[in-house]
Amino acid sequence: MNKNVGGIDRGIRITLGLALIAAAATGTVGLWGYIGVVPLLTGVVGWCPPYALLGFNTCAMKKH
């Protein structure tokens, strides 16, 4: 399982995930806000299944 989520993408996913979870926990949005777990986990792990299926990769290219 190679990483396919780059630095900026990871930061956005983690921030968005935490914001959605916090909004759901405070009752600002409904229970659907807990869907923020998905972007949070993909940001922390650095791998996104849909990216893998579609061939996307936002990681910086490694120089050989």
Image (tube, helix red, strand yellow):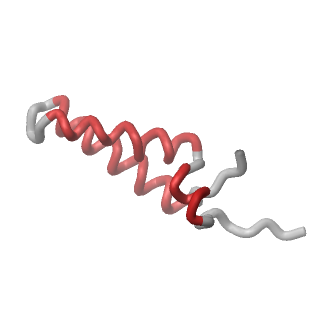
The single residue placed furthest to the right in the displayed view is 64
Is 19 rendered above or below residue 57?
Answer: above
Q: Is residue 23 left or right of residue 60?
A: left
Name the residue: 19% across, 29% down.
Answer: 25
Where is residue 4? Give x, y as percent.
Answer: 63, 57
Name the residue: 11% across, 41% down.
Answer: 29
Which part of the image, by quadrant, shows the C terminus? bottom right
Where is residue 19? Give x, y as percent.
Answer: 27, 44
Where is residue 28? Give x, y as percent.
Answer: 9, 39
Q: Is residue 60 left or right of residue 40?
A: right
The single residue placed furthest to the left in the displayed view is 28
Where is residue 63? Give x, y as percent.
Answer: 84, 70
Which part of the image, by quadrant, shows the N terminus? top right
Is 35 rendered above or below residue 54?
Answer: above
Name the residue: 33% across, 50% down.
Answer: 16
Residue 32 occupies which quadrant of the picture?
top left
The single residue placed furthest to the front in the displayed view is 53
Q: Is residue 44 left or right of residue 39?
A: right
Between residues 17 and 11, which one lies in front from this camera angle?
Answer: 17
Is 63 rendered above or below residue 52?
Answer: below
